[in-house]
Image (cartoon, grey):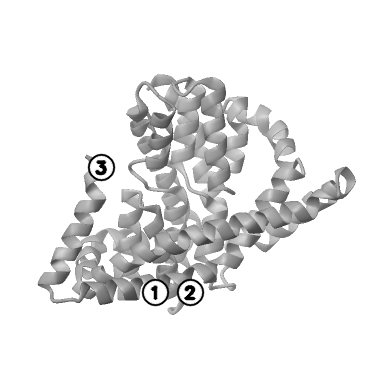
């Protein structure tokens, strides 16, 4: 069902462009051309974010945080095994996806931990990555409030995820 | 961002100088390498999606989508400049459908458009929070990974995920409504 969605969307757009007498090749090429400067403009932000996550990981800081926060998290119903995922998720999409597949192999793909990890993974985005990329062009905005609100909201959904996976 | 970046980098480097100093540069370089790999990937993903978007714009379809979502947008963001409304509508639709390659270009354009106008703090904050808390309906990458690993029922996490992501978005929206002033 979902496999059809994107192809059908493309088909509709292309047919519509022919009806509207928009030149499909010219328009598509023009759009694609804009992608290059675009990716170049967000590259510096990506470098900073990735350097940050690498250092955070390699210095053992992320493990230290995991150990320190585990008791608090388990009080709220988040299992110790998933603390790291909750912490990594706001920083790194690829890192948390790697962690997710690690959880799958360690605990079994259909275990409570694995299902819970899936819901945590799917319930929020990589907050700091989005902050860095979306505001790449603007240094003036103060991002503290939006970032804090997003982190709080994501954290609540993690707690909720661990709860709902017990009953569903 | 500056506070977080500063704090994390200073502490990490300090710890590494004590533990194993030779890892500092290699960690930073591997961060840069990962950023480059991702950027290269993004170039072609964005190229395809921005090509499609150009078609959407030239045919006027994007205006139609924007018109459809205008009442919902007004409720969430307040009065929006027309162009910002267009980009926000496309971004939100792409978000809901889980087309992650398409959300970022539209998101950046929406924010750049809002930056041109004054007193858009509220709209920008709301827009950021909605994007950061994710409104994706189908968690496609998780589903792919689960079926790859021979899960008995890969899709049994769809409903809990929808509920959890809905909750995070609603909490986010409420927090913005409570703590950020509409100017």
Q: Pick out the residue farthest to the left.
A: A19
Where does the C terminus of chain A fall, quadrant-wise? top left
Spatial separation of the CA atoms under disc 3 and disc 2? 32 Å
CA separation in Å, label 2 and label 1: 8 Å
Give the CA distance from mark 3 to mark 1: 29 Å
Q: Is residue B80 visible?
A: no
Residue B90 shown left or right of residue A165 in the figure: left
Tell me the residue at 68%/34% (across/down): A66
The residue closer to the viewer here, B49 or B162, is B49
Mark 1 Cα shell of 10 Å, populated few (<14), some (14-19), many (≥20):
some
Secondary structure, mark 2, is helix
For the N terminus of chain A, the quadrant is top left
Reading the image, the residue beneath label 1 is A33
Residue sitting nearer the eye, B133 or B51: B51
Residue for badge 3: A2
Q: Is A164 placed above or below B71 here?
A: above
The residue nearer to you, when weighing A61 against A22, is A22
**B112 horizontally vs B52: left or right:** right
Q: Position of residue B43 (x, y in %)?
A: 46, 64
Nearer to us of marks 3 and 1 is: 1
* Label 3 vs 1, first from the N-terminus: 3
* Location of residue B48 by image quarter: bottom left
Q: Are marks 3 and 1 in contact (CB under 8 Å)?
A: no
Task: List x then y, in percent, for residue A30.
Answer: 33, 76
> Residue tagged by mark 2?
A37
């Amino acid at each position: 069902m979902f496999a059809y969605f994107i192809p059908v969307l493309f088909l509709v757009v292309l047919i519509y462009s022919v009806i509207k007498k928009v030149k499909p090749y010219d328009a598509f090429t023009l759009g694609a051309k804009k992608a290059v400067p675009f990716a170049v403009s967000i590259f510096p932000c990506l470098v900073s974010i990735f350097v940050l996550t690498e250092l955070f990981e390699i210095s053992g800081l992320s493990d230290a945080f995991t150990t320190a926060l585990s008791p608090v998290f388990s009080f709220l119903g988040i299992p110790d095994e998933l603390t790291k995922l909750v912490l990594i998720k706001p920083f790194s999409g690829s890192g948390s996806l790697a962690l997710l597949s690690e959880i799958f192999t360690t605990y079994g793909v259909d275990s409570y931990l694995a299902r819970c990890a899936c819901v945590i993974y799917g319930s929020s985005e990589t907050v700091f990555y989005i902050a860095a990329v979306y505001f790449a062009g603007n240094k003036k905005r103060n991002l503290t409030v939006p970032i804090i609100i997003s982190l709080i909201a994501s954290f609540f959904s993690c707690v909720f995820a661990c709860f709902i996976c017990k009953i569903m | 961002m500056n506070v977080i970046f500063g704090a994390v980098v200073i502490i990490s480097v300090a710890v590494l100088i004590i533990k194993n100093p030779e890892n500092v540069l290699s960690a930073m370089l591997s961060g840069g390498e990962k950023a480059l790999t991702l950027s290269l990937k993004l170039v072609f993903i964005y190229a395809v999606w921005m090509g499609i978007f150009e078609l959407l714009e030239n045919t006027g379809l994007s205006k139609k989508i924007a018109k459809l979502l205008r009442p919902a947008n007004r409720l969430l963001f307040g009065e929006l400049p027309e162009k910002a409304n267009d980009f926000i509508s496309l971004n939100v639709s792409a978000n809901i459908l889980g087309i992650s390659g398409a959300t970022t270009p539209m998101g950046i354009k929406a924010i750049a458009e809002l930056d041109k106008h004054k007193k858009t703090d509220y709209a920008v904050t709301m827009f950021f929070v909605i994007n950061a808390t994710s409104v994706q309906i189908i968690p496609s990458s998780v589903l792919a990974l689960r079926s790859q690993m021979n899960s008995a029922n890969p899709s049994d996490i769809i409903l809990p995920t929808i509920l959890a992501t809905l909750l995070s978005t609603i909490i986010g929206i409420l927090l913005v409504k409570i703590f950020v002033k509409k100017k």
